Image (tube, rainbow, N blue to C red):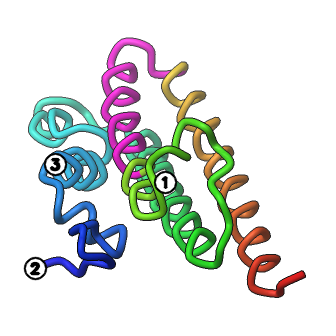
């Protein structure tokens, strides 16, 4: 059961969106729980583990979740999404879309890591930096919106 914010049946929360839409659930939760890819989860016994890579993927996934959560809070406080890629999705859709894009990026990065590990680690680090910057900006905007003019 999901909570809806309107009669239109749109989910009221990020978790509601992930639970409501099976594709979001599959991509997001699968990528985050597997640390980048469901294939790596299945093949873990066949390949030696790269602990630094799995750590980077978990930090990246945590950054994506934090970005989605702080974006949602900012939107609820009255802010508007500034990223044109996400702005069309609406208040409920922006965080869910961010989680989905983050999940797909985890899968792509994990795939890239098999053939180009240094490049994949560098790109994951850049993604982490962008997520941290987005979270800091989202918190600042939310505080400004709550404080009022």
Q: What element carries label 1?
A: helix
Quote the CA–CA distance across marks 2 and 3: 17 Å
The residue lying at 49 percent from left, 49 percent from top is 60
Q: Do the residues labelled 2 and 3 touch (CB within 8 Å)?
A: no
The residue lying at 27 percent from left, 66 percent from top is 10
Quote the CA–CA distance across marks 1 and 3: 16 Å
**Magenta stretch: residue 130 in it?**
no
In the foreground, 114 or 51: 114
- The magenta region covers 99-118
Q: What element carries label 2?
A: loop
CA neighbours of label 1 inside 10 A, class few (<14), some (14 to 19), many (20+): many
- Residue beneath disc 3: 26
**Magenta stretch: residue 103 in it?**
yes
Give the mark, 1 or 3, whose residue is nearer the N terminus: 3
The residue lying at 49 percent from left, 44 percent from top is 88
Give the mark, 1 or 2, whose residue is nearer the N terminus: 2
Quote the CA–CA distance across marks 1 and 2: 24 Å
């Amino acid at each position: 059961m999901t909570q809806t914010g309107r009669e239109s049946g749109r989910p009221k929360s990020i978790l509601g969106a992930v639970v409501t839409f099976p594709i979001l659930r599959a991509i997001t939760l699968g990528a985050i729980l597997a640390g980048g890819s469901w294939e790596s989860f299945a093949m873990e016994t066949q390949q030696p583990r790269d602990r630094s890579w799995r750590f980077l993927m978990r930090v990246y996934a945590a950054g994506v979740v934090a970005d989605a959560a702080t974006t949602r809070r900012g939107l609820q406080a009255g802010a508007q999404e500034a990223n044109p890629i996400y702005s069309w999705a609406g208040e409920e859709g922006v965080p869910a879309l961010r989680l989905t894009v983050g999940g797909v990026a985890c899968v792509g990065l994990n795939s890239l890591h098999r053939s180009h590990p240094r490049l994949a680690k560098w790109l994951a680090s850049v993604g982490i930096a962008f997520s941290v910057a987005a979270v800091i900006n989202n918190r600042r905007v939310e505080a400004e919106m709550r404080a009022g003019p």
